[in-house]
Image: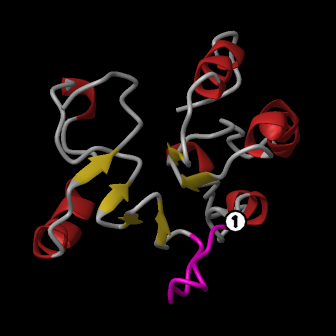
Amino acid sequence: DLRQTEWTRSTLAHVDSKDYDVFLLPGDLSYADTHQKLWDSFGRLVEQYANRRPWMATEGSHEIEFFPWIRRHTFKAYNACWLMPYKESGSTSNLYYSFDVAGSHIVVVVVVHVPWYNTNSAHKGEGESMRKAMEELLYKARVDVVFVGHVHVYER
């Protein structure tokens, strides 16, 4: 969860100091939460870093922007700001895609936002419906690693 806090610049400087081929972001990018101006400020904040090396993102809980009485289309701003190679990978949605980089096929390396397993009791079960829908598929595909965000801690 990159966000836009006092720690964000420090995090970006740390990431930028490393030698990497692609930066995988598992959601909760700008924390705009329907405040569209925050997408603009986030873009200005990360532009100098994202222009140098590829950033591949997935959507998070703060990108949903779903309010049935106002907006019926989810992830509208995210999809407009963070266009991923979904068409090139045969997907019909910007929220699901795959690509090759540095000898890996990202899908065999999976990036999702909400963890299916974690020890934080406040977040237990949040990814359960997605786990039930996709876990068997990922096992069959012999996925090597899954990167997740959301909980703001490191676990493995």
Q: Which residues are magenta?
A: 83-94
User: In the image, 124: left or right of 55?
Assistant: left
Residue at coordinates 59% horizontally, 30% vertically from top-left? 2
Quarter the C terminus occupies: top left
Q: How many marks?
A: 1
What element does badge 1 sit on? helix
**Badge 1, how many Cα within 10 Å: few under 14, some, many 20+?**
some
Can residue 129 be found in the magenta stretch? Answer: no
Q: Which residue is mark 1?
A: 79
At 56% from the left and 40% from the top, the residue drawn is 28
Q: Quadrant of residue 108?
A: bottom left
Q: Is residue 5 left or right of residue 118?
A: right
Answer with left or right where residue 98 lies relative to residue 110. right
- The amino acid beneath tag 1 is Asn
Residue at the image point whose x is 49% and y is 73% from the top: 97
Q: Nearer the viewer, residue 83 or 20?
A: 20
